[in-house]
Amino acid sequence: MTPLQYFASRPGFFLIAGPCVIENEEMAYRTGRHIKSVCDALDIPFAFKGSYRKANRSRLDSFRGIGDLKALKILADVGRELGVPVVTDIHEPQEAAMAAEFVDILQIPAFLCRQTDLLIAAGHTGKTVNIKKGQFLAPDSMHFAVEKVRESGNDQVCVTERGVSFGYGDLIVDYRGIPVMQQTCRAPVIVDCTHSLQQPNTAAGVTGGRPELIETIARAAVAVGADGLFLETHPNPSEAKSDGANMLPLDRLEGLMVRLKAIRSTIDSFRS
């Protein structure tokens, strides 16, 4: 069963969640096990995510990772123990084959969604490819990125909305883009509920965020009919080594998922 078949195997939405970056083995296992227990109880298909390395950092002294192979092995081990697909980002074409040895879904960062060689390299691995929509791109333009992967011989593709640049230091989600991308890309559409709340380009060189609005973004995404949700979570966001300013505290995940399941159930009852 491919990750997309697994995601579609149950009604409602699926969840891609985990820490921004793999910091150490203990944190990865703790986070993954908690998310898995919540999703199992609520019958939500789940994929564990974590970056093995952060390539897009505002400052040179920002934390970037613990070593590529070490982090990738942790990702693979967590996925194997939990029995769930694993997601990680790749940044250059030569990384695709390396990461594909350890994970099930290769994620294309938003800033790189037009990089043809990167998309083709990801497609050639045969792994599922999740393309994040660039902050600068219209929803109906995303099908060009999707077709690059499909034309490489790989039809296992999904796309992720993560906000559009709004001035110099904020993002906004246009929910019209969800049905537009579902129709034009003919692929599952995911909404990134945490990166959509980033506030980049702060004077300190550290990205800010509005984590108190994560539930607002998620509720609207589920109500509109997003196929999946993406969010970053951490046992203690204030101590996270990357993107802590817009992460969901791990202990708030269960309550959020319960409320989102209720919203989707209500919406689906009107459709039937």
Image (spheres, helix red, strand yellow):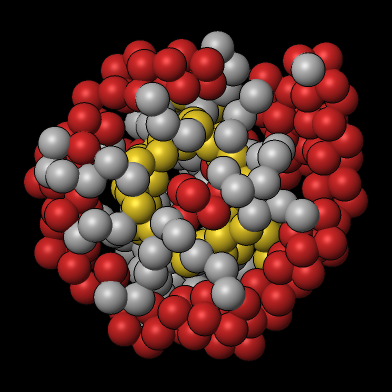
Q: Quadrant of residue 147?
A: top left
* Of 179 and 107, the residue lying toward us: 179
264 w.r.t. 200: above or below: above
Q: Position of residue 118 (x, y in %)?
A: 17, 49
Q: Position of residue 179 (x, y in %)?
A: 52, 16
Q: Position of residue 50 (x, y in %)?
A: 49, 66
* Quadrant of image for the C terminus: top right
* Of 209 and 11, the residue lying toward us: 11
Q: Residue at x 52, y 75 (%)?
A: 79
* Of 206 and 123, the residue lying toward us: 123
Q: Position of residue 92 (x, y in %)?
A: 18, 57
82 w.r.t. 231: above or below: below
Q: Is residue 170 left or right of residue 104?
A: right
Q: Quadrant of residue 251?
A: bottom right
* Quadrant of image for the N terminus: bottom left
Q: Is residue 218 left or right of residue 159?
A: right
Q: Is residue 97 left or right of residue 203?
A: left
Q: Quadrant of residue 131?
A: top left
Residue 204 visible to an observer of this rendering: no
229 w.r.t. 25: above or below: above
Q: Is residue 104 left or right of residue 226?
A: left
Q: Residue at x 28, y 70 (%)?
A: 99
Q: Residue at x 22, y 53 (%)?
A: 122
Residue 43 visible to an observer of this rendering: yes
* Of 67 and 157, the residue lying toward us: 157
Q: Residue at x 35, y 52 (%)?
A: 128
User: How many marks are shown on the rendered structure?
Assistant: 0
